[in-house]
Image (cartoon, rainbow, N blue to C red):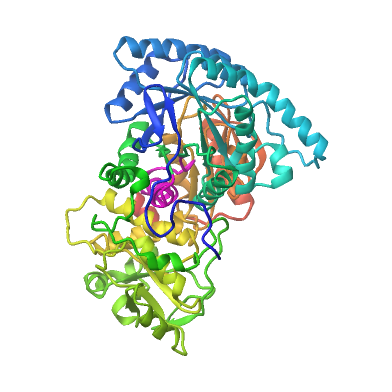
Amino acid sequence: MKNPAYCPDPWVYHRRLTREVKVGNVGVGGRNPIRVQSMLTCDTMDTETCIEQTLDLVQVGCEIVRITAPTVKDAKNLQLIKRGLLERGCDVPIVADIHFKPEAAFEAAQWVEKVRINPGNYADSKKFVVKEYSDQQYEEELERIRGRFTPLVKLCQERGISIRIGTNHGSLSDRIMNRYGDTPLGMVESALEFARIARDLGYHDFIFSMKASNPKVMICAYRLLVSRLYTEGVDWNYPLHLGVTEAGDGEDGRIKSAIGIGSLLADGLGDTIRVSLTEDSVHEIPVAQALVLRYNAVSAGNAGLSDVASGVSDDGEKSENDSQSRTYALPYDPFHFEKRETETIHLNGVDLGGEELIRVAISRANFEKIAHKVDKMGDFQPEIVVEDSGVVAVDPRDSAKIAEINGKPQPCLVTVLDHIGLPTITAFRLLTAQLQSRHSILLKDTLVPSSDAQKDFVQTLLESATNLGAMICDGIGDAILVQGEQAPGQSLRLAYNILQASGSRIFKTDYVACPSCGRTLFNLQTTTGRIKAATTHLKGVKIAIMGCIVNGPGEMADADFGYVGGAPGKVNLYVGKTAVKFNIPEAEAVDRLVDLIKEHGRWVEKPVEAAEVMA
């Protein structure tokens, strides 16, 4: 495969240089740092609470604040929120989040610095209608959209404010679904339809996003979008807003966010990010700041973003620009997930490679620390001891050594040497490009094993999830080793959670939980906690918890069951994308969800020991 133009350079870090789009007084794209933003969780009509939440976000470093405006009434109240903020000396840019109603968008655009519209439901209601569109019918639909979108574009043009064309995997229009399917290509085409309307009107102050709850889908969609923008021409250099929708809470939410957002940032993509956690929104900001820190530091240390000619190795040092890598074909398809094909290897009673699950490895030193309790570690047991595996460690720039491995008659387990001064992702891509596919690869989260027992675990978590997640989502790797965390139990838990969040190995209940906002019809944090308490022992069951219907049915496409706010105090329950129970009182809804899981034969009783631990 030839190296496609989906990022500035898949081998050496360069940030994609875009045009600058102003969001109030904050520049996004261009030579600006990667911006951090978040969203309010309260009712938009509660003016005082909106002001207080905004001030709290700004206090912790949020640079752009988004507020939902589901109705014209809510949109009008943005004027009071904006006025109240200015009276308190806060001029943070406000973004109105719009779904379904062009009238609300037009009203909001009179008061805020940016309007986010979702091409999948702007002037459309999702009906999941199966219909074949002729070319003429499709063009008629586009003309209808043009008529509804043009007034907003003209108003934003007059006021000098920006628009985010924000596609969500969970809410593509019926028109797009029936022509392109529920695919990254459909997401890209949906956004480009609106972008062409804006460009026809001479308007360029817009930002793209391609958000999904599945990191693999999200990564492919953004890459495909950028590839299309490169193809369209140099003046299609619009900034990108990155985010994983419905990431969840706690470690799981942070890991999933790092896999999706961090992978793209590592390839030089992204100009502003939002980490979507099912927690108070102030907790999103430190995570987002940690994700962008190293890339903003690299940019600030160079003459210009377009002049960044070196990657960032795991110890923070610049790595040499290795032109050797430019001669190799990219060892993965950036637009479609496909697991690298290898042959099965038998190692001390464990099979890996081939059709086997991605295995979890541990060092001999760490194994000895937990050997006395391995049988009590449940789902977090190590499967391979590195020193006993026969793994061959190489510098991927040593082509002679790799040729020697390729000449062996039997498949080997191969990894990258530590402390070689290359960024982890670059090193493993370079190894994969040269290694025959029959050989298995042991991935590492870092090539600089931690020697700091006091290192902040959240930072380790984000770095590990970014590096391992990026490679796993590219189909690379048959086993993983976390060596950025010294504590063996914690490193094993992190390894398994990264596999779960990347969709590569499901060993516990999988939750898709959206962050709260003004559209939410129940308390998401409390409800998520209650659902987890009742169902967290259901291995392999995927449950979606959605505050409203905007992304609910779509993002639940691969969920087994869904819990969705249907009206204030009422919940609808889904099996897949199909609503099967309606208007259940919130107080009964969790019990009814359990009943639904039982009806479909997916329920098992909680093990006694697990119940005792939780008690």
In the depicted structure, whether residue 311 falls above or below residue 128 = below
Residue 213 on image: x %, y %: 51, 45
Residue 346 lies, in percent from the top left, at 44, 83
* Residue 255 among those drawn in magenta: yes
Q: Quadrant of residue 550?
A: top right
- Residue 208 is left or right of residue 201, and the answer is left
Report whether 592 appears left or right of 607. right
- In depth, the one of 601 and 317 nearer the eye is 317
| Residue 122 against residue 542 in the figure, above or below | above
Residue that sits furthest to the bottom in the current view: 409
Vertical position of residue 40 compared to residue 318: above or below: above
On the question of residue 41 being in view, the answer is no
The answer to which of 59 and 380 lies nearer the viewer is: 59
Q: What residue appears at the point 45 percent right and 20 percent down from the top-left corner? A: 113
Give percent across and percent down for residue 223: 52, 50
Residue shown at the point (33%, 36%) measured from the top left: 285
Magenta stretch: give its range. Answer: 242-269
Q: Nearer the viewer, residue 319 or 57?
A: 319
Whole-percent x, y for residue 200 in the image = 64, 28
Residue 58 on the magenta segment: no
Dominant SS type (magenta): helix
Residue 344 seen in render: yes
**Exactly how many numbered labels are in the figure?**
0
Q: State whether residue 366 is above or below residue 268.
A: below
Q: Nearer the viewer, residue 51 or 209?
A: 209
Q: Work out which quarter of the rendered image holds the N terminus and state it.
A: bottom right
